[in-house]
Image: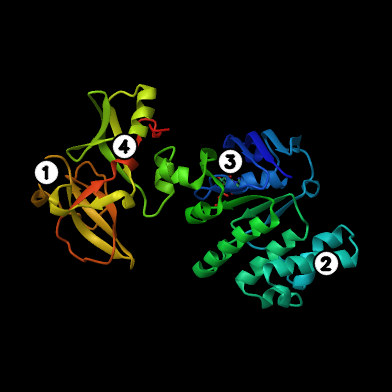
Amino acid sequence: MARVRLENVCKSYDNSEHMAVSDFSLEVQDKEFVVLVGPSGCGKTTTLRMIAGLEDITSGGLFIDDRLVNDLEPKDRDIAMVFQNYALYPHMSVFDNMGFALKLRKRPKEEIAAAVNEAARILSIGHLLDRKPRQLSGGERQRVAIGRAIVRHPKVFLMDEPLSNLDAKMRTQMRAEIIKLHKRLNTTFVYVTHDQVEAMTLGDRIVVMKDGLIQQIDTPQNIYDTPANVFVAGFIGTPQMNLFHGARLVLAAGDYYVRMFGREFLLPEEKQQILKGKGAAEQAVIAGVRPDDFELTAGGSGITALPDLGEVMGSEVILHVRIPKEGVGIADLSEAEGVVESDDENLNWVGAVIVQKGGASGSTEAVSILPDASKINLFDPATQANLLL
Ligand code: ATP
């Protein structure tokens, strides 16, 4: 059993004004897989190192199973950490690397051998036990680093970008293995990455961070469907969510609509209820529509858009289009000048990215598109917060 709770945890290095982590509160449930994700420098590693006890906490409380552990030595926390750079001892065999922590604890030889062999079996590296780290591939080294953590039977596993040194194919493979490992070990995992795909696929819950602050904590699906703010909307999901700055929330006969590109889209019942509950007034909004949530319509009944570029992905094409602003005809569009995605107010069009299912059409003829109104997100231009949360 291991729950990890952080209460208003702050960290400033060298007691400077700059907070690497501010007011971080999170409760990781027993056996949960939580992923901390965010751009470089947002404080992910610092948070993980504070949990491990490798970094002092400036203020706030860190609890493991309701026990305050702020001042507990790392070795007494029953936590194992897997680092990005593996940190294997080059002169030791794989077996000795994996058994080292138990040897330090003066465990009997038989117990060490049993634990190492069991971990090697779980990770399918039994045939590598006599080798030195330099005789291993990146993926194999990564397994050894994980194996070294497993042998200690920790209550909590901390992983800091463990896959970032691997090539794309190996990363995908190891990602699947980490999911299986979590199921098999049935322990609490806290995992740090800057890769939003890794976060989405691994986490029971994701913590999105920026500038030392938590932006959102939720399941991958909820974060994808309803990002808390413009930053999260742009960070989670590829291609990125389209953000249309010129949109407006309109109230007519008791119903809310989003007005964009000269059209009004009735919001679905669930979103009506949220906005009514808040008593939302008509206002300018940033409308967020994922590239997948546009449909190409036949017969020109939708919004007209001009494709500039199509990235062929096989099963789909990622279309970069220019959508004329209200009152502008397709023939009057100013040039893209190489910049397809743009929200420049001097231009008479807005750039958007649309996923077109099926094979390539390759055509640069104007298309007609409609957003799925049930999936539109609305952000307040002033606070950047999602009005639907
Ligand atoms: P990355 O993905 O690049 O590893 P991160 O999100 O893990 O980034 P941290 O390493 O936690 O970010 O760093 C958070 C902030 O704290 C950054 O502004 C960083 O410069 C600063 N920082 C990190 N370690 C130290 C240190 N030892 N001394 C001073 N400042 C530090």
Structural distance between the alpha carbons of marks 3 and 2: 41 Å
User: Identity of the amino acid at label 1?
Assistant: Val
Contact? badges 4 and 1 (CB < 8 Å): no
Coordinates of residue 349 in the picture (x, y in percent): 19, 46
Structural distance between the alpha carbons of marks 4 and 3: 30 Å
Please tell me whether mark 3 or mark 2 is closer to you in this view.
Answer: 2
Please tell me whether mark 1 or mark 3 is closer to you in this view.
Answer: 1
Q: How many C-alpha atoms fall within 10 Å of the one at disc 2: few (<14), some, or many (≥20)?
A: few
Coordinates of residue 303 in the picture (x, y in percent): 18, 46
Disc nearer the start of the sequence (4/1) = 4
359 with respect to 157 (left or right): left
Q: Which quadrant of the structure image shows residue 306?
A: bottom left
Is disc 3's CB within 8 Å of ligand 1? Answer: yes
Q: Nearer the viewer, residue 104 or 185?
A: 185
Structural distance between the alpha carbons of marks 4 and 2: 58 Å
Q: Quadrant of the C terminus?
A: top left
Mark on residue 20? 3
Q: How many C-alpha atoms fall within 10 Å of the one at disc 3: few (<14), some, or many (≥20)?
A: many
Q: Residue at x 75, y 71 (%)?
A: 94
Contact? badges 1 and 3 (CB < 8 Å): no
Residue picked out by circle 4:
286
Disc nearer the start of the sequence (2/1) = 2
Mark 3 falls on what kind of element?
loop
Mark on residue 328? 1
Q: Quadrant of the N terminus?
A: top right
Mark on residue 114? 2
Coordinates of residue 190 in the picture (x, y in percent): 63, 49
User: Identity of the amino acid at label 2?
Assistant: Ala
